[in-house]
């Protein structure tokens, strides 16, 4: 699969184990972006010439591909900049309208800052209370505690499907069923789920799903909010400007229907078109065989790491995850990351935008290795060699 990705052709020695941060881009995605700029770089929804019509067509075709992939209608796919922006849109425009002072919003203690700070901002504005399911002593999600909080009465529940620190996949199907049973609207942060699993939005049963293009082999600058249309239609715009309006007078304006209501200004046209190509790539390659292969590769990563004396994982590494975060006794994570980088092994080091979770796990900084479509045995072998040498050198 690496042959599809120019990143690896141009960096033949690269051992890329940072997919959870951002994924490499296949040639088809790069070509789609390049074709737009080379052949038809018009603006969308506002040009009355052929170049603009071609841009319009490519932009809305990408939306159609995404809608089909997730099993939703085209008008349920809203383009935003990334997961973070999509989350903030739901917080401000949907939950912001529902919430009364003192109402509870249910989160978990494992969230990425995107699914935490956005709610803190809303709580500060509205007087809502944020409640968090606890993280157990192993750094794992406590489903029973989450359910207890849910039935105690909450106005909204937002949770990640897969932790970007521990790799744990939450039992989202059961959680969504429980929330639905109580009439609690829900949002799934799919940033770490969508690169590894195809999601059927209707079957999943969430009200909103958000994810980032750059983590699913697409361009940066594009993320998606998928929402049930009747809910999107209740939402007021968060950002005003061109393209999202119906009528404008000095005395006030009326707005387009979703999704355009939430896409003010010139959108990242090339990135949307590139995302359409990334979806095609995923559709072809995210097969059951690939799922098996990723499980095998991840087991290889864990075996390599488990051979290191004094390694401690955040969360339970024995789950069928696609990433592992760890610390090694006597070796600072930043030093380890720097050494691995010298050996062309790219991993993530730091607090991984999840400060409260790292604090709960009692660590200041960790190293994360994450895998994806192109990970192969040679990546694992090189990781094993480099990390063994690093520990000998640094301890
Ligand atoms: C679980 C999770 N949620 C949200 C985000 C934020 O994604 P973005 O920076 O693309 O908005 C990330 C990024 O790592 C993530 O892992």
Image (tube, helix red, strand yellow):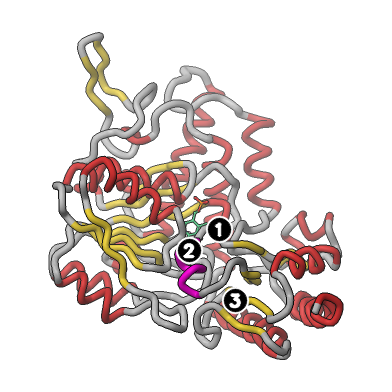
Q: Which residue is mark 1?
A: 216
Identify the mark nearer the N-term, 1 or 3: 1
Q: Quadrant of the N terminus?
A: bottom right
- In terms of secondary structure, where does tag 1 sit? helix
Circle 3 crowding by C-alpha within 10 Å: few under 14, some 14–19, many from 20: many
Mark 3–mark 2 CB contact (< 8 Å): no
- Prevalent SS, magenta region: helix
Which mark, residue 387? none
Task: Check if residue 27 falls in the magenta segment.
Answer: no
Q: How many numbered circles does the render carry?
A: 3
What range is drawn magenta here? 355-361
For marks 1 and 3, give the CA distance: 19 Å
Residue 291 on image: x %, y %: 55, 78
Name which residue lies at 27% across and 63% down. 131
The answer to whether residue 394 is seen in the rendering is yes
Which mark, residue 194? 2
Q: Which residue is mark 3?
A: 324
In which image quadrant can residue 327 be found?
A: bottom right
């Amino acid at each position: 699969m690496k042959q599809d990705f120019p990143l690896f052709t141009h960096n033949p020695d690269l051992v890329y184990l940072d997919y959870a941060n951002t994924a490499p881009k296949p040639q088809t995605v790069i070509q789609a972006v390049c074709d737009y700029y080379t052949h038809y770089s018009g603006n969308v929804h506002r040009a009355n010439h052929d170049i603009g019509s071609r841009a319009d067509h490519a932009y809305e075709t990408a939306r159609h591909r995404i809608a089909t992939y997730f099993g939703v209608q085209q008008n349920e796919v809203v383009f935003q900049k990334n997961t973070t922006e999509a989350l903030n849109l739901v917080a401000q425009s949907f939950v912001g309208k529902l919430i009364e002072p003192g109402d509870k919003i249910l989160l978990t203690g494992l969230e990425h800052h995107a699914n935490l700070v956005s709610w803190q901002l809303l709580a500060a504005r509205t007087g809502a209370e944020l409640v968090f399911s606890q993280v157990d002593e192993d750094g794992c999600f406590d489903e029973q505690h989450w359910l207890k909080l849910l039935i105690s009465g909450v106005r909204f529940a937002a949770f990640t499907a897969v932790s970007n620190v521990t790799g744990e996949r939450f039992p989202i199907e059961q959680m969504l069923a429980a929330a639905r049973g109580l009439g609690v609207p829900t949002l799934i942060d799919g940033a770490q789920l969508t690169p590894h699993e195809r999601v059927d939005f209707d079957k999943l049963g969430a009200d909103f799903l958000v994810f980032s293009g750059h983590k699913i082999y697409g361009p940066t600058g594009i993320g998606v909010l998928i929402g049930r249309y009747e809910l999107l239609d209740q939402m007021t715009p968060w950002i005003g400007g061109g393209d999202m309006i119906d009528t404008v007078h000095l005395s006030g304006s009326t707005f387009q229907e979703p999704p355009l209501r939430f896409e003010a200004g010139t959108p990242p046209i090339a990135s949307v078109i590139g995302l359409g190509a990334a979806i095609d790539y995923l559709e072809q390659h995210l097969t059951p065989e690939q799922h098996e292969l990723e499980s095998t590769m991840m087991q290889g990563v864990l075996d390599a790491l488990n051979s290191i004396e004094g390694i401690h994982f955040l969360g339970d590494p024995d789950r069928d995850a696609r990433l592992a975060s760890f610390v090694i006794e006597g070796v600072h994570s930043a030093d380890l990351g720097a050494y691995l980088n010298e050996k062309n092994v790219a991993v993530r080091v730091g607090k991984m935008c999840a400060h409260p979770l790292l604090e709960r796990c009692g660590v200041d900084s960790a190293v994360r290795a994450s895998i994806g479509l192109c990970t192969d045995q040679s990546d694992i072998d090189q990781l094993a060699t480099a990390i063994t040498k690093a520990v000998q050198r640094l301890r």
